[in-house]
Image (spheres, grey):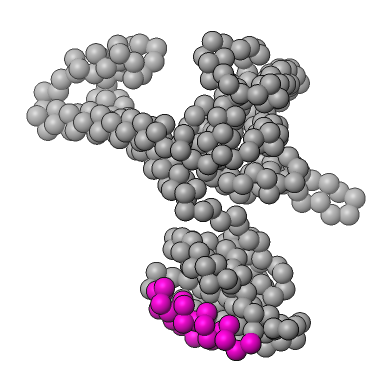
Amino acid sequence: MKETKFIGLDVHKETIAVAIADGGRDGEVRFYGTIPNTPEAVRRLFERLSGSGSDPHFCYEAGGCGYGIYRQLRQFGAVCSVIAPAMMPKKRGDRIKNDRRDAVALARLLRAGELTAIWVPDEDHEAMRDLVRARRQAKDDLVAARQMLLGFLLRHGRKYSGRTNWTRMHWRWLGEQAFSSPHQQFVFAECIRRIEDAQARCDRLDRMLEEAIPGWSLAPLVKALQALRGIGLVIAATLVTEIGDLGRFRTPKHLMSWLGLVPSEASTGTRTRRGAITKTGNAQARAMLVEAAWSYRLPAREEKRYRIRVEGLSEEIRAIAWKAQARLCQRYRRLVAAGKSQPKVITAIARELAGFVWDVSRQVQPS
C-alpha cells in the first residue's frame, strides 16, 4: 500500500515553493525546494514525488495564478485541493512570513485536515464567470464615469432640476451645458465621451452574455432562477457562475452560511452575543441577492414581463417562485412594522431568498 505524502505548494507568478509532510501524526515536515512555475516543472515534480512509491496529495491557495496547476495535476491522476485563503488557520504570535514557511504550513495543515477546499469550476464555467465579471467591471466603470461628471457639474453650480438623472430629458439638459473656459469645456466633453464608451462596452458585454448562456450546460438553472422575483438574467447568471455547483450544499442553511448572510456570534458560557452578518464567501453573489431582495418591498404580483420570463418552466419551479414571493413580501411588511431598520430587513429577505435559490436548483438538471 502506498504511503500518502501531503504536498504544500506556495504558488507565485514565477516560482512555486514546495514542502512535504509525511503521513502520520509524527511524520516529518520538510521544505523540498523552489521550482519554476511552468507546466514542465510541475510535471517533473509530480513524477519525482509519485515515483518513490508514495501517493502525493497536493494543495495550494486560490489566487491570481488561477486553476492551471490544479487541472494539470488532475490530468496526471493526482489528488489536488485548492484552498480558500480566508479560511487558513493563522497564529496571532507568528510575525515571520515567507514562501518557505507558507509551503510548510500548507503541508502540515493539509495532513491535519484543517484546510477548507474550494469548489473548482471547469474551463467552460470559468469562461462564463470571466464574462460575467467583465460585465460587472464595465458596469462599475460606467457608474464611476457618471459620478465623475456629476461631481464636475456640481462644483460649477450646474444642478439638474428634474427628478431622475440619465433619462432622455437629463441628456438633453447635458447637451445644453456650456463653459466659458475652453479647458473646462474640454473636460466636460471628455466626461461625456467616457460615459458613452462605458455604456457601449456594457451593451456589448450584455449581448455577448445573452448569446453565450443558451449554449452553457447550466443554462436551464439560469432560466429557472429567473422565476424568482427580482432575479433577472444578469443576477441569475452571476449567482450561478459565482456559486457554482449548488448541489454541494446539503441544506439551505449551508448555502446561507457560505454566502455570509448569517449572523456572526461571539458567545461564551451562558452569554450569547450575535452581531452583524459574517460576510464570508462570495461577495458578488451576496450583493446580487441583496439587490434582488429590494423587489420584495412591493406587494406580491405577477406582471406581464414576469409571465413571459417564466414561460416554459415547470409547475414545480413556478410554485416555488410564487411561494417565495408571497412569503418574502409578507415578511418584509412584518419586519418593517416591527420597527426593524431597512438594512436589517433587506438582509433578512436576502438570506431567505438564498434558501429559495437552493430549492429551485434541486428541480433543475444541467443540460
Q: Camera-side residue: 181 or 147? A: 147
**Residue 50 drawn in magenta:** yes
Percent coordinates x, y for residue 300 in the rendering: 66, 13
- What is the span of residues highlighted in magenta in the rendered image? 32-53
Is residue 205 visible in the rendered image? The answer is yes
Q: Quadrant of the N terminus?
A: bottom right
Q: Quadrant of the C terminus?
A: top right
Report the number of discs.
0
Quadrant of res 86: bottom right
Describe residue 133's horizontal placement relative to residue 88 as left or right.
left
Query: At x 49% / y 48%, what residue is drawn?
Result: 125
Query: At x 46% / y 64%, what residue is drawn?
Result: 68
Is residue 306 visible in the rendered image? The answer is no
Percent coordinates x, y for residue 291 in the rendering: 55, 30
Q: Camera-side residue: 230 or 5? A: 5
Does 52 sit above or below residue 272? below
Percent coordinates x, y for residue 278 in the rendering: 66, 46
Query: At x 66% / y 66%, what residue is drawn?
Result: 115
Percent coordinates x, y for residue 190 in the rendering: 19, 33
Does 7 sit above or below residue 302? below
Describe residue 262's horizontal placement relative to residue 229 as left or right.
right
Which residue appears farthest toward the front when viewing the image? 367
**Residue 73 drawn in magenta:** no
Query: At x 72% / y 69%, what residue is drawn?
Result: 113
Q: Camera-side residue: 32 or 78? A: 78
Quadrant of res 295: top right
Which residue appears farthest toward the left when viewing the image? 182
Describe residue 280's horizontal placement relative to residue 100 as left or right.
right
